């Protein structure tokens, strides 16, 4: 009997010692069994050679050069042979929220980012990581080396949820930094003005990046299960608010649904994939169905 689903539960994965092990379990539990990767991509336009280093894919060794020089060189291409994946991780204060019995939004986003990093590097593709709150906090340059996973996980593990964020400004900044076209994967609760968020996302599309937006929310933020008079703590500079949840529930849920709908429709209008993730979802539900759908869509478009 396959026991992988119990490892894919976010609460279980978060309790495991180290994101690297959680990433391996998450990927090996379901993604490794897929026949085709939804991320893999190789350029065909040869550009130049570079010297081989341990860990490189030997499929790209130029054996003709080796026969003449007795040295190993890899063929390089205009798109550096690999797909380039930029992971953008929101580490603002609101991402630290967790309702009772659940991991925080930041912990969940880290697990998703860890799993995707592991997957991308297993395919000899390249991954980059940017963490941000009020500004871009850390930026790891892209690499396809297997050892790069350790760097990605160390940065995520050492990054707490703090400060406010300005998503529009952050996206404009990063769009100018990313010189090579690639796949941008955003992990955020998207707590900002939709118009500013979408303007920043349009900048990525203008630079001809492919973009996937994962909006990560706690189930309490969607279902509003509170019953008794509750003091709601303000995050990112907002004040605390004492309120009767029963009198607010319908209006609150209408606002949240409208907010998510505006973001989803805005992303669709500029050909950006939008995926809502709940932190009570197991990672197989959160990722495998989306990745399979994306893979099938890309296959049909070829």
Image: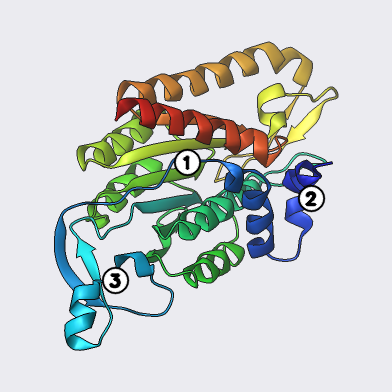
Give the x, y percent position of residue 65.
18, 78
Q: Nearer the viewer, mark 1 or mark 2?
A: 1
Quarter of the picture holding the C terminus: top left
User: Which residue lies at the image location 76% right of the left edge and 45% below the top edge?
Assistant: 4
Name the residue that disc number 3 marks. Answer: 61
The earlier-in-sequence mark between 1 and 2 is: 2
User: Which residue lies at the image location 56% right of the left edge and 41% below the top edge?
Assistant: 34
Side of 14 where 176 appears, left or right = left
Give the x, y percent position of residue 104.
69, 46
Mark 1 in CB contact with mark 3 (< 8 angstroms): no
Name the residue that disc number 1 marks. Answer: 36
Q: Which mark is residue 12?
A: 2
Q: Nearer the viewer, mark 2 or mark 3?
A: 3
Can residue 190 be seen here? The reply is no
Side of 164 where 64 appears, left or right = left
Side of 233 where 127 appears, left or right = left
The earlier-in-sequence mark between 1 and 3 is: 1
Instruction: Please name whichever residue, 65 or 55, is drawn nearer the observer in this view of the structure.
Output: 65
**Category of crowding for the residue at label 1, using alpha-carbon neighbours closer than 10 angstroms: few (below 14), some (14–19), many (at least 20):** some
Q: Is residue 280 above or below residue 170?
A: above
The earlier-in-sequence mark between 2 and 3 is: 2
**Category of crowding for the residue at label 2, using alpha-carbon neighbours closer than 10 angstroms: few (below 14), some (14–19), many (at least 20):** few
Instruction: Please name whichever residue, 196 or 294, is drawn nearer the observer in this view of the structure.
Output: 294
Instruction: Name which quarter of the figure residue 179 lies in.
Output: bottom left
User: Which residue lies at the image location 39% right of the left edge and 57% below the top edge?
Assistant: 125
Q: CA distance from mark 1 to mark 2?
A: 27 Å
Side of 298 where 190 appears, left or right = right
């Amino acid at each position: 009997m396959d026991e992988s689903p119990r490892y894919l539960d976010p609460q279980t994965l978060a309790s495991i010692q180290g994101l690297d092990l959680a990433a391996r379990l998450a990927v090996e539990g379901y993604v490794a069994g897929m026949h085709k990767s939804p991320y893999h991509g190789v350029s065909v336009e040869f550009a130049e050679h570079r010297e081989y280093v341990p860990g490189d894919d030997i499929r790209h060794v130029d054996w003709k050069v080796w026969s003449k020089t007795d040295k190993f060189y890899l063929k390089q291409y205009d798109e550096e042979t690999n797909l380039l994946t930029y992971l953008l991780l929101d580490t603002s204060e609101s991402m630290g929220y967790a309702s009772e019995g659940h991991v925080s939004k930041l912990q969940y986003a880290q697990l998703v980012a860890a799993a995707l990093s592991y997957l991308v590097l297993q395919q000899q593709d390249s991954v980059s990581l940017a963490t941000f709150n009020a500004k871009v906090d850390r930026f790891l340059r892209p690499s396809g080396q297997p050892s790069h996973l350790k760097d990605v996980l160390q940065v995520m593990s050492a990054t707490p949820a703090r400060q406010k964020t300005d998503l529009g400004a952050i996206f404009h900044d990063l769009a100018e930094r990313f010189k090579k076209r690639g796949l941008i994967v955003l992990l955020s609760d998207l707590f900002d003005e939709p118009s500013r968020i979408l303007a920043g996302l349009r900048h990525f599309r203008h630079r001809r990046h492919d973009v996937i937006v994962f909006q990560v929310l706690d189930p309490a933020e969607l279902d509003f299960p509170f019953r008794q008079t509750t003091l709601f703590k303000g995050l990112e500079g907002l004040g605390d608010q004492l309120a009767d949840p029963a009198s607010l529930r319908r209006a609150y849920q209408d606002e949240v649904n409208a907010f998510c709908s505006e973001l989803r429709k805005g992303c669709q209008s500029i050909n950006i994939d939008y995926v809502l993730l709940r932190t009570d979802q197991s990672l197989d539900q959160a990722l495998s169905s989306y990745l399979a759908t994306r893979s099938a869509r890309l296959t049909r478009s070829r």
